[in-house]
Image (cartoon, rainbow, N blue to C red):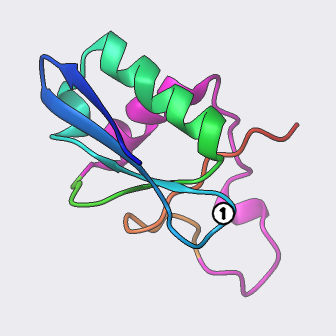
Amino acid sequence: MSAQLQSPAGEIEILPMKGFPLGAEVRCGDLRRLSPGARARVKQAWLDHLVLLVRGQNLSPEELLEFGATFGELDKAAPDSEMPAGQKPRFNPSWVTWTRTR
């Protein structure tokens, strides 16, 4: 079952992951151009499914942070200089995680 939602940026489709207890794929246009209402629907999908997969986005680190604010206040991580010796830098533009845990 999918929920198709309209926004000025185009159609948004939420597809629950088949065969998995949680997760959904969000199919939409450019995340940078979503209306506030469409962003609210993406946030609700995250609340409903806990894990979201959004393919085909090419966001700069600044754009990624701006979109991440869709899900609430962002916590700042310690700078790489304060991480244990030998740990790789954290930023990977192919993988981003937002969590609801506190």
- Compared to residue 22, the image places residue 62 above or below, namely above
Q: Quadrant of residue 49?
A: top right
Residue 5 lies, in percent from the top left, at 28, 26
Q: Amino acid at mark 1?
A: Asp
**Residue 71 forms part of the magenta stretch:** yes
**Residue 83 forms part of the magenta stretch:** yes
Residue 88 lies, in percent from the top left, at 62, 80
Element type at marker 1? helix
- Crowd class of label 1 (few under 14; some 14 to 19; many from 20; radius 10 Å): few
Total numbered badges shown on the rendered structure: 1
Q: Which residues are magenta?
A: 59-88
Of residues 35 and 63, the one drawn nearer to the viewer in this rendering: 35
Residue name at image x 18 percent, y 27 percent: 33
Q: Quadrant of residue 81?
A: bottom right
- Compared to residue 93, the image places residue 73 above or below, namely above
Q: Which residue is mark 1?
A: 80
Specify whether 16 is left or right of 64: right
Specify whether 80 is left or right of 42: right
Specify whether 56 is left or right of 70: left
Q: Where does the C terminus fall, quadrant-wise? A: top right
Residue 41 lies, in percent from the top left, at 43, 24
